[in-house]
Each structure stands twice: as C-alpha cells, then as structure tokens.
Image (tube, rainbow, N blue to C red):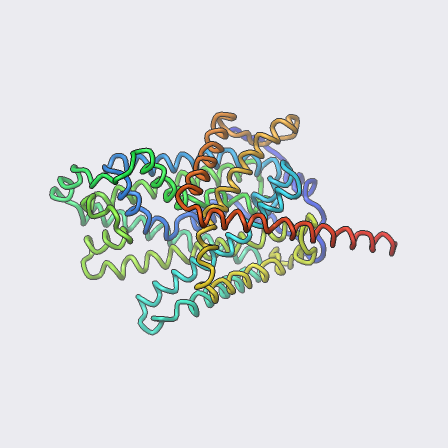
Amino acid sequence: METVQKSDASVNEVSPPHARGGSLLRVLGVVFGMAVTVGITIGMGILRTPGDVAAQLPSPSLFIGAWLLGGVYALLGAVSVAELGTMIPRSGGFYVFARRALGEYPGFIVGWSDWLSTCGTVAVVALVLGEYAGRLFPALAGRAAAVACSVTLAFAVLQWRGVRWGSRSQELTSLLKTVAFVALIVACFALGGGDEAQTRNALPATTPNVSFMTALVLALQGIIYTYDGWYSTVYFGEEVRDTARNIPRAMVGSVLLVIAIYLLFNLALIYVLPFGRLAGEPLAAGAAAEAVFGPSGATVIGVVAILSLLAAVNGNTLTAPRVVYAMSRDRLFWRGASRVNRGGTPTVSLFMSTAAALLMIVYSGTFSSLLAAIAFFFVFDYTLVFLSVFVLRFREPEAERPYRAWGYPLTTALALLGSIAFLAGAVKADTKNSVFALELLGASLPVFLALRLWRRARESREMRST
C-alpha cells in the first residue's frame, strides 16, 4: 500500500459545519476499522451460502476457487475505495464519494438506497438472531420479533451514549465472533473428516443442469453477498485517527482476514462433509457441526450464529446513522438530523435509523421484496463508487491523495466490470425483484426534488430575515 502522512486537520477543511450540537469525534483506530468490517461482513451468509455454491459447482477445487475469486473482488474494491476514503475523509460512506464525483442527485440516490438497505439489514439480521435465540432458549421460541426489537434497541441505547461505547462493543462482539469461527474451524479439522470423507470428496458432486459460466455467475452472486461489508471503515472517515494510514490498513487488513476465515471455513466444510452432501445443504455449518459434535452440533452452531449476528447488528446500527447524518449536513435532508451529542453520536440520525429498522421488523412479513432488493442496492452503489474513482482521477488530478489505489486503473476497472456483470446477472436471474429495486431507486427522484424545493424556500426565508 502506498501511503503518505497527512494531517488530520484536513478533515475539518472538507467537512461542512454541523447544524447544531457537538461534532463527530476522531477517536477510532485500525482495530475499530477491522472490527466493524469483520463484524458486518461475517454473518449468516457464510453459514448458509456454502451449500448453495457447492450445488452450482461440480468439484471441491472449483468451489474453493470461487470463494477465492469473490475474495479478490472484495480486495480490489477495498484498495480502490480506500483511495476515496483518504482523499475525502468524511463520515457517511459511499454517499460522500458519489456526491462529490457525480453530483447531488446521484449522491442522493446512493444515500437513499444505502440507508434503506442498511436499516433493512439490521432488521433481517436481528430477526434471524431472534430465531436462533428461540432454538437455544425454549422460553423465547416464537418470539423472534420481540427478541429482534430488544436487541436492536439495546445496541441503539448503547451507541446513544457515544461513539466510544459503540466502538468498544463492536470490537468485543467482533472478537468473540472471530474466536468462535476459528474454534469451529479447528474443531472440524481436529475431530472431523478422515479417509472416508476425503475419498468421497475426491468425487465430483452432481453437475448442475446449466452451463459452467451460468453456474459460476450464480455461485459468485451468493459469494459476493457474503463478502458484502468490506467497505465499512469508510463510513467513519472523519472519526478515524490518522486517516492516511489507518483507513487503508483497516480496509485491506480486514478483507484479508475475512478471506482467510472464509477459505479455511470452506476447506473445513469439505474436510468434514462429503461434497455431494454439502451441495444444496441449507445450513452447511450446522451439518458440519452435527458431523463433528453429534447431537450437540445444533447448540454449537446456534452459539456461533448468535455471536456472529450480534456483531452484525451493532455494526450496521453504527453505520446507518452516518449516511443520514452526512446527507443532512450537506442539506440534502432535514438539517436537524445532523445533530451530534457530546459522545460523538449523531442522535437524531440514530433515532431515525433505529425506528426504520424496528418498523421493518414489526412488518417483516410485508417487506420480503425489499429484502430481496437489498443486495441489488449494495452492488449498484459499488458500481457508482468505483466509477467515482475514475471520475475524480480525471476531474481532480491534482487533488491530494494520501493513498493511491494499488494497480490503478486495472484493479479499479476489474472491480467496476465485476459489479456491472453482477447487476446484469441479478436482473436476468431475478427480474421481478431487480425491477422492484429500480423502482425504489426511481422513487428517490420526487423525494429529492421536494427536499431541494424545501431547502431553497428555507434559504430564501433566511436571506429575507437577515
């Protein structure tokens, strides 16, 4: 990584003044950046997706190769977006970059879709956590929504106290998650497998009745979903100390850690389970735990899942308010949402994000299409952000870039092309929900126009009053 020193005073030079109250605190470091990325990225996807991927690909070598390819895509994304994170060290994530490179409305679209999908992620992850809690504790059975609301509120209250509380809880939950996954991987290699399993894994699974390229695209769709979250550090740009050094280190370091965990975990699965059984298994991690621990396997995987999901809920609860906060500060949303308390928490934005997540939990039966659109939103945002790297390199060649994307323009171009291919595949494979996602993006236009008229009217009143 190519980095140079840069004063943290630059944050203040690019950050507009806050509406009222305090300001974000520059108290976060590399450990938090890695913790929030690991916490958000490693979730239910890695517990469920391996079975779907194995069903599409005919052999263990192709299976592992696809996971490695997905990791390379995430790594290319990280080295590209890290350039933007150090060039524009503001909290708010993808919205900040798209607005500067592409303009107000594209920025608003990214912010709109990013906030909506992140709140939806809080809701769905909390609901799955509630389901696992019901399996482990019979008294909670059938109360997934109540558990989900309680967990969401608990993390929101914790973060209300300040960014230090939120960061410490993220570091703790991510550490517990990592330890749990490492322990499960070690147990699989130490207690599972054997000659019989390895012999059966030498034989390919049943080849899917589709072309190899179609099978690979379908497999990569699930894998890219599972790697989603690799960019999380940039949502806290102006809260990270020494951004020029710490943002690239946190982003690249955390992605490499996630790749290592995913590859080892999947190797452990094919060491324990015959590949033919892994293919199509709805909860591959559960099947492996049962093979290793017997009847206690369900309890083991339940504990791993809950630890994993706690970190994901906390991480997304930290992230969502930063998007609304940044839009509000740029007057693309209600200015009151930029209020920050003494602890460095954007409280109004946190309240709005938590309320949205709770509504989605309560009405979870009616927003299944929204959940299906979330993955489309994520990759749509990837596409615009990778495009922003090219636009800013062309339009602002002399701008200070403390870190420059390694391998540019090839690495960024590969990430951009991968995102475009992914979107095309998503439209073809799931046209209904892809169209729904595009309709939701289109719905941002009247909202944007209404907010702009409201902002102009307010500015006009303020000018007359002075």
Q: Is residue 287 visible?
A: yes
| Placement of 169 over or under 108, stated as above or below | below
Q: Quadrant of residue 394?
A: top right
The structure residue drawn at horizontal position 39% and vertical position 37%, both measured from the top left corner, is 71
Of residues 250 and 72, the one nearer the viewer is: 72
Number of on-image labels: 0
The image position of residue 162, as x and y in percent, is 58, 58
Of residues 112 and 132, the one nearer the viewer is: 112
The structure residue drawn at horizontal position 37% and vertical position 50%, both measured from the top left corner, is 45
| Placement of 52 over or under 295, stated as above or below | above
The image position of residue 29, as x and y in percent, is 53, 45
Of residues 239 and 202, the one nearer the viewer is: 202
Q: Is residue 232 left or right of residue 183?
A: right
Q: Is residue 58 left or right of residue 74?
A: left
| Placement of 28 over or under 394, stated as above or below | below
Q: Quadrant of residue 353?
A: bottom right
Which quadrant of the rendered structure holds the C terminus? bottom right
Residue extending farthest to the bottom is 139
Q: Is residue 461 left or right of residue 314?
A: right
Q: Is residue 161 left or right of residue 262?
A: right
Q: Is residue 258 visible?
A: no
The image position of residue 120, as x and y in percent, is 49, 56
The image position of residue 61, as x and y in percent, is 25, 34
The structure residue drawn at horizontal position 39% and vertical position 71%, both measured from the top left corner, is 143
